[in-house]
Amino acid sequence: MSDPETAFVTLGADVGGKDAHCATQAHILAFRRVLAAACRARGSYGTRIREIALVLRIDGSVQAWMKRGVEDVALQKRNAFATADIYIPADVWSDGSDFRRFLASQATLAIGQVIELARSKGVALSSDILRRDVAIAVDDFLEA
Amino acid sequence: VERIVEVARVGEEGAHVARALEEAAHGNKVDGRLATLYEKYDKEGNFLKHGITRHENPAKRYTAKEIDGGTVVRTDRGPRTERIKKERDLVERRPGPDNHDPWAGKRLGE
């Protein structure tokens, strides 16, 4: 289990309103906890990438991006930092039962796209171990 | 000694006022342009601060570094002048640990 402060996979959230925050906060905190528990600390998946930062962009009453799914996957070699945005429209969180499944599936997809990007840029990453650890986190999250 | 402390305190507040005036004169103007109020939380969901965006485009995304694995919640949007007043009111009454303005907590619990 890695400390949340040194977790390799982090899950940030840019939330478009209090309504969206109230509906999603508990699920996001739960997913952060299982990701920190299942994934290893920074440096465990290779030394070229220190962190994969997933950022949820959740539509709400103040801001809505009107997009869905994974976008803007990027790798900053200089900072050893990979990012991916996951856009979540309001219809996903307004029906609570769908939110966890959507979050889990899109996070898995985002990690897969980061792995592919790293491979295409020749950046070493222990992708099989990372995929397995993220799958464990997703299973724990969906079973809870 | 009390007088020196008082002068220092006034000086500190004066510096903040001067900085606000300087910002108003250079790009970060207090005017009718739109601004967004936000709340920031850490990775564990603990409230950190009230804040206000400096950029004009409301759809502009906070970067992963800015969010730092936590959560930013956009709570209100409107003319910048009014949002600044609202932010100050919130910081005076219900500041977070990362609100370091001299007026933070001055009206705590009101």
Image (cartoon, coloured by chain):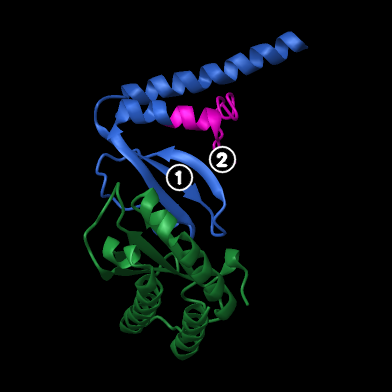
Q: Is residue A34 left or right of residue B5?
A: left
Bounds of the magenta span? B87-110
Q: Is residue A27 left or right of residue A1?
A: left
Is residue A58 found inside the magenta-colored segment of the image? no
Instruction: Measuring from the top left, give residue B1's x and y in whole percent.
Output: 78, 12
Residue hosting label 2: B96
Q: Seen from this angle, which residue lies furthest bottom?
A: A128
Dot 1 crowding, Cα within 10 Å, few <14, some 14–19, many 20+: many
Q: Main secondary structure of the magenta part?
A: loop
Which amino acid is tagged 1? Glu
Disc with the residue nearer the chain's start (2 vs 1): 1
Find chain B in the image and tell me its colour.
Answer: blue
Q: Is residue A59 left or right of residue A124?
A: left
User: Can residue A42 be seen from the camera position used here?
Assistant: no
Instruction: Measuring from the top left, give residue A56's x and y in whole percent.
Output: 37, 63
Q: Seen from this angle, which residue lies furthest right?
A: B1
Provide the secondary structure element on which disc 2 rests: loop
In the picture, the quarter occupied by the C terminus of chain B is: top right
Disc 2 and disc 1: Cα gap in Å?
9 Å
Q: Is residue A100 left or right of residue B47?
A: left
Provide the secondary structure element on which disc 1 rests: strand
Find chain A in the image and tell me its colour.
Answer: green
Residue hosting label 1: B39
- Is the C-beta separation of discs 2 and 1 under 8 Å? yes
Q: Nearer the viewer, residue B53 or A23?
A: A23
Dot 2 crowding, Cα within 10 Å, few <14, some 14–19, many 20+: many
Residue at (46% x, 28% y) in the render:
B88
Residue at (33% x, 69% y) in the render:
A74
| Disc 1: host chain | B
Q: Seen from this angle, which residue lies furthest left?
A: A66
